[in-house]
Image (cartoon, grey):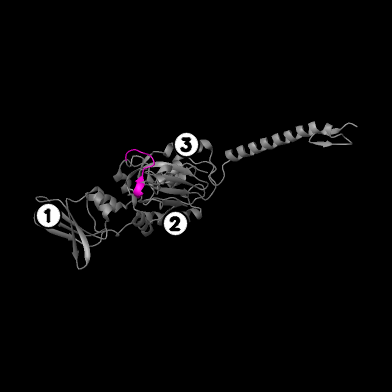
Amino acid sequence: MRCSQRLLGIVVQNCPRSELVTPLKRISWLGLLITLLAAVAGASSKQDAPSGLLQLSKQNRVDIERAFTSDLVYTRTAFPMGKAGLSIDNGQLTPFGPALQQAIDTFGLAAQRGDLVQITGITLKDDHIRFEINGGPEKVSKWYQKITVYGPGGTPVPVKPGKPGADAAPARHGSFVDLHFETSVRELTVDCLKELLHPVFDFAAKSSLEAYLDTVPPMVQQAIRDHRVLVGMNREMLIFAKGLPTQKTRENNSGTEYEDWIYGAPPQDVEFVRMINNEVVRVETMKINGQRVIREEREIQAQMDPDATSNKQGDDSASRSSAGEPGGLPCSRGSLTSPTSAVPVPSLDRGPTETVNPSSRCACR
């Protein structure tokens, strides 16, 4: 009796075994081929479809890496060195204020406000993007630099001969900032990213002074432009306003250490600026005519921290956004603000008479 065969299966009725070998082999190979094709198609679709919150296209990712990698930019906040780094989450910069100063004291300072830094690496994760500056936080070494070979007498012998230190990995003094996302993002433009990174980077500044001025209140801005010292300034503000002193003295008065920064020399006015704990507490000016002017009353808030100001304004803007007012960030991420008040700009979506925060122009979704 002959064998009855169907597609995708075989029905056998009293069929000799010799007649079953060939069709069974064919079907087994066909099944294996279908399985392999299905696996390849599944892997390909999984690779093409991004997972996580950042569901960006391949071209979008390439554009972001091209736009930011090796870019020079001025900082709007201090960066702690090493693995500490900074984080922007829902428009809020962390750490800031005392926590940021503690991280800098622990790990060291990678960049001050107003410093020109280079973005040396970009890593796109499922829910955040990491921007590394000045080489990033970690020191990378070659595999043979992790091996130590000891010769006679316990003397270390280099694994690879050559100049001492020639192959040593350069010490990195960089840092990073992680930009986090809370909702799904399918497209992220370069301009949008620049606005989201505004708490830490100033892409529009043309000088260190311009970038720094944007992080301090208007009163301090004007004093720095006029090269005036205000009681309550910190060390950074003083240097931007007057530069480094011609002379500096350090003394101790009843257990309190202080520094006197001296600017000028006769026959010009001479200014003595006293610093205690990174704050200007006294300004004494000796004029050419012999007049002596002393200012000790605080003129601005001591130890003003633009990061803390920025986060406070971010909380206010976030509450306004949740109430339905304009100014919220796209991607449902809350609001992004700068230490200084944002300049109103015409809204293209809400009509020419209405104003919104510049960050609302960010067109990521």
Q: Position of residue 120 (x, y in %)?
A: 40, 41
* Residue 177: % across, % down: 42, 48
Magenta segment: 152-163
Which disc is residue 315 wearing? 2
Residue type, label 3? Asp
Give the mark, 3 or 2, whose residue is nearer the N terminus.
3
As measured in the structure, the alpha-carbon distance from the residue carrying label 2 to the one carrying label 1 is: 46 Å
Q: Is residue 159 left or right of residue 244?
A: right
Mark 3 sits on what residue?
63
Residues at circles 2 and 1 in contact by the CB criterion of under 8 Å: no
- Which amino acid does the dot numbered 2 rest on? Asp
For numbered disc 1, what is the local secondary structure? loop
User: In 3D space, how far apart are the residues under numbered discs 3 and 2 (Cα atoms)?
Assistant: 32 Å
Left or right: where 108 falls relative to 352:
left
Number of the front mark, 1 or 3: 3
Give the image location of residue 305, x and y in percent: 34, 56
The residue that mark 1 highlights is 287
Q: Are marks 3 and 2 in contact (CB under 8 Å)?
A: no
Amino acid beneath label 1: Lys
Front-most of residues 267 and 33: 33
Q: What is the spatial separation of the Cα atoms under label 1 and label 3, in whole angstroms?
A: 58 Å
The residue that appears at 14% across and 53% down in the rendered structure is 270
